[in-house]
Image (spheres, rainbow, N blue to C red):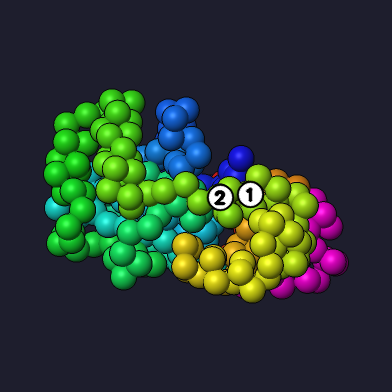
Amino acid sequence: MYDPIQDGIDKTARSVRYAVAKSPAHLSGLVHCYWELKTESTLADDFCLHALPDACVNILFNEADTDIAGVTALRTTYEVLNLGKSFHYVGIQLLPGVWQGNPQEIADQFVGTPYTGVLPLVATNRELALRDFSAKQDVLSGLVQWFIDAKLVVSNPITERILAQLDDMRTVADMAAVACISPRQLQRTLKQTTGFSPHDLLKVLRIQQSFKQHYLDLYADQSHYIHSFRKVTGYTPAKYIDKFDV
């Protein structure tokens, strides 16, 4: 199954804890993980999270202010998020293609204002705030089930096939063959269900893969790999690995 890396946390960061937990088995085809990012004490300087695109959608909750929540996702380039000196966030990371909520609600930047939409995010956040991370997971699973019942989270057979056979894809034509549809159908279907073009989705998935396998399995040569990596992450591969926990 697709296993994107965590967002970039500087190796010099102190008193910042990131925890992750897998979803229950019956949700594993929809949810990659539940996560928590928090400070264990007030930091001397603002902490900046180097967020990487992974084609996932996150349902985000600010535990320090339970009115703040949102739906977030990045497109094809990184974003630096200044989280300040003290913070506590919890989230649900949904696999690519399963979120079918209002695309206008998806933020690609720092979420710092109260949630005013129709989803039960604020009520959920208030319930989450009373629990430790292990106990929060039942609440998060309950919210995912609410999304499923409301048909806001649905299985996506096209992206399921793509994610299951990433090692067999180097081109958009390969992606269409894996998905068992024509390139034109792939273009239309991915745009409708993920917001990505096939080319952009492939770009993001290949960078994610490059953290876990040799780049020559994915790119024609080193210069192409470095150019693509820098465009998506803002760093060369060597500098990224030197700076961030991977």
Tell me which residue sits at (14%, 41%) in the image. Answer: 126
> What segment carries the magenta color?
214-231
Q: Which residue is mark 1?
A: 161
Tell me which residue sits at (27%, 57%) in the image. Answer: 70
Q: Which residue is mark 2?
A: 157
Q: Quadrant of residue 123?
A: top left
Query: Which of the pair 7/104 is nearer the observer?
Result: 104
Q: Which mark is residue 11?
A: none
Q: Position of residue 218 (x, y in %)?
A: 78, 58
Q: Position of residue 36 (x, y in %)?
A: 36, 40
Query: Which of the pair 218/146 is nearer the observer?
Result: 146
The amino acid type, in three-letter code, at marker 1 is Arg
Instruction: Note whether 76 is above or below 145 in the view shown.
Output: below
- Camera sees residue 7: no
Instruction: Note whether 241 is above or below 225 in the view shown.
Output: above
Contact flag, marks 1 and 2 (Cβ < 8 Å): yes
Query: Which of the pair 125/117 is nearer the observer?
Result: 117
Q: Is residue 82 left or right of residue 79?
A: left
Q: State how far apart marks 1 and 2 are (Cα).
A: 6 Å
Which class describes the residues within 10 Å of circle 2: few (<14), some (14-19), or many (20+)? few
The amino acid type, in three-letter code, at marker 2 is Pro
Secondary structure found at label 1: helix
